[in-house]
Image (tube, grey):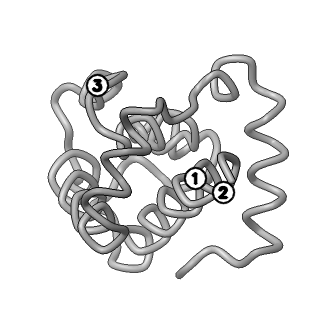
Amino acid sequence: MIISDYEWQGLKTRLGRSTFRSRFHLSPHDKEYVHLKGYDTIESHAEDFIRKRLAPSHIPNDGKQTPMKGHPVFIAQHATALCCRGCMEKWHHIDRNHALTEGEIEYAISVIMRFIKDELELES
């Protein structure tokens, strides 16, 4: 369930209306890290974070599991409302009361990577 260009533009517009979500951008250090590691590695990190921190059906610290800094994926998660199951439910209509399906995990990763790629394109 990869996000289409059309869906991404709509989501980006909605997220842009949120004062909280729209303040998240990759720092020069984050961008350098992405360039250094490459998209495949960053995507692997995103998958690992999603599977460990968001995919289980019960998350004891939901709402507090994603740091606000320290990795480009964390920034992207907050910018795209994929930081906790509550935000996923509110913004992406993914019910918080079940383990994420493979399609939902794939969707989350694709949204995160679209955000990161868009941020890198802004510097060009």
Instruction: Count neighbours of disc 1 (C-alpha within 10 A) and say few if under 14, some if 14 to 19, many if 20 or more.
Output: some
Q: Identify the residue position indicated by label 3 in the image.
A: 67
Q: Residue 121 carries which label?
A: 2
> Closer to us: mark 3 or mark 2?
2
92 lies above or below 80:
below
Q: Nearer the viewer, residue 45 or 83?
A: 45
5 lies above or below 119:
below
Question: Is 5 on the left or on the right of 20, as rendered?
Answer: right
User: In the image, what residue occupies the spot 44% across and 42% down?
Assistant: 77
Alpha carbon distance from label 3 to label 2: 24 Å
Instruction: Count neighbours of disc 2 (C-alpha within 10 A) and say few if under 14, some if 14 to 19, many if 20 or more.
Output: few
Q: Position of residue 93 (x, y in %)?
A: 61, 53
Q: Nearer the viewer, residue 87 or 13?
A: 13
Q: Outermost residue, front direction? A: 124
The mark that comes first in sequence, 3 or 2, is: 3
User: In the image, what residue occupies the spot 46% across and 33% down?
Assistant: 28
Instruction: Count neighbours of disc 3 (C-alpha within 10 A) and say few if under 14, some if 14 to 19, many if 20 or more.
Output: few
User: In the image, what residue occupies the spot 48% across and 53% down?
Assistant: 95
Q: Which of 85 and 42 is in front in this view?
A: 42
**Kind of residue sitting beneath label 2:** Glu
Q: Which mark is residue 120?
A: 1
